[in-house]
């Protein structure tokens, strides 16, 4: 049996779960450069769930699109964290509902007894910090891919 390859995924939507730092690194790579308005961010204190509805750049399709000359794509994706005890943010306020944020990375810093902190780093010095009882993240594509409005792949440091 051979290892799975990106090409084996075809055009099926992604559905991933991360319960450790290594798994979250995969999720972070897939959501890099996702954009979302502040209004698409929710925290349900009672359910202890924090969710973002992202417009995710399809990094898993980037090289293939470039190789065959097809437009780059984005897809609407839910990024959900469970067991969230506290949420803090900087660089924006919830009242700025139309403000569009760009997600750069998602990291996890473990604490004691499985607890920890998830940091969502945003472009422009913004950030969201989640204090979690344990790492419980899911990423699920919820629409079909669509052509990226800019027609370009995100670039950093250029």
Image (spheres, helix red, strand yellow):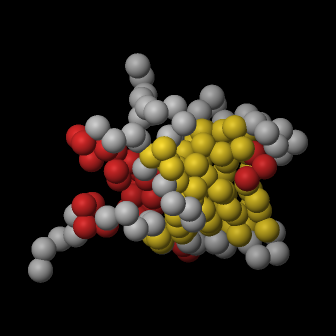
Is residue 17 shown above or below 60? Answer: below
The image quadrant of residue 155 is: top left
Q: Residue furthest top?
A: 158
Residue 136 visible (yes or no): yes
- Residue under the point 70% across and 63% down: 50
Where 58 falls versus 157 (above or below)? Answer: below
Q: Quadrant of the C terminus?
A: top left
Q: Quadrant of residue 47?
A: bottom right
8 horizontally vs 110: left or right: left
Which residue is at the front of the view, 143 or 50?
Answer: 143
Q: Quadrant of residue 77?
A: bottom right
Q: Is residue 109 visible?
A: no
What residue sits 45% from the left and 46% below the top?
73
- Please provide percent x and percent y for residue 90: 73, 39
Q: Position of residue 21 (x, y in %)?
A: 43, 62
Residue at x 82%, y 43% (from the top left corner)? 97
Question: Which residue lies most toward the left here?
Answer: 1
**Residue 109 x/y as whole percent:** 52, 56
Q: Is residue 96 left or right of residue 35?
A: right
> Where residue 32 sits in the image (x, y, percent)?
48, 45
Query: Seen from this angle, which residue lies furthest bottom?
Result: 1
In the rendered image, the quadrant that contains the N terminus is bottom left
Horizontal side of 121 relative to 68 (left or right) equals: right
Q: Nearer the viewer, residue 124 or 130?
A: 124
Q: Can you say whether 53 is above or below 71 in the image?
A: below
Q: Please give the count of numbered marks on the rendered protein.
A: 0
């Amino acid at each position: 049996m051979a290892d799975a390859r990106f090409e084996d995924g075809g055009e099926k939507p992604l559905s991933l779960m991360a319960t450790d730092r290594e798994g979250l690194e995969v999720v972070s790579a897939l959501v890099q450069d996702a954009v979302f308005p502040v209004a698409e961010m929710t925290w349900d204190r009672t359910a202890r769930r924090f969710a973002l509805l992202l417009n995710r750049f399809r990094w898993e399709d980037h090289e293939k699109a470039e190789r065959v000359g097809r437009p780059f794509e984005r897809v609407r994706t839910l990024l959900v964290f469970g067991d969230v005890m506290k949420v803090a943010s900087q660089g924006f306020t919830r009242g700025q509902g139309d403000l569009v944020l760009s997600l750069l990375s998602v990291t996890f810093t473990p604490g004691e007894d499985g607890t920890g902190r998830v940091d969502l780093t945003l472009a422009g010095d913004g950030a969201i910090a989640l204090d979690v009882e344990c790492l419980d993240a899911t990423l699920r594509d919820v629409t079909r891919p669509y052509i990226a409005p800019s027609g370009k792949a995100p670039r950093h440091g250029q």
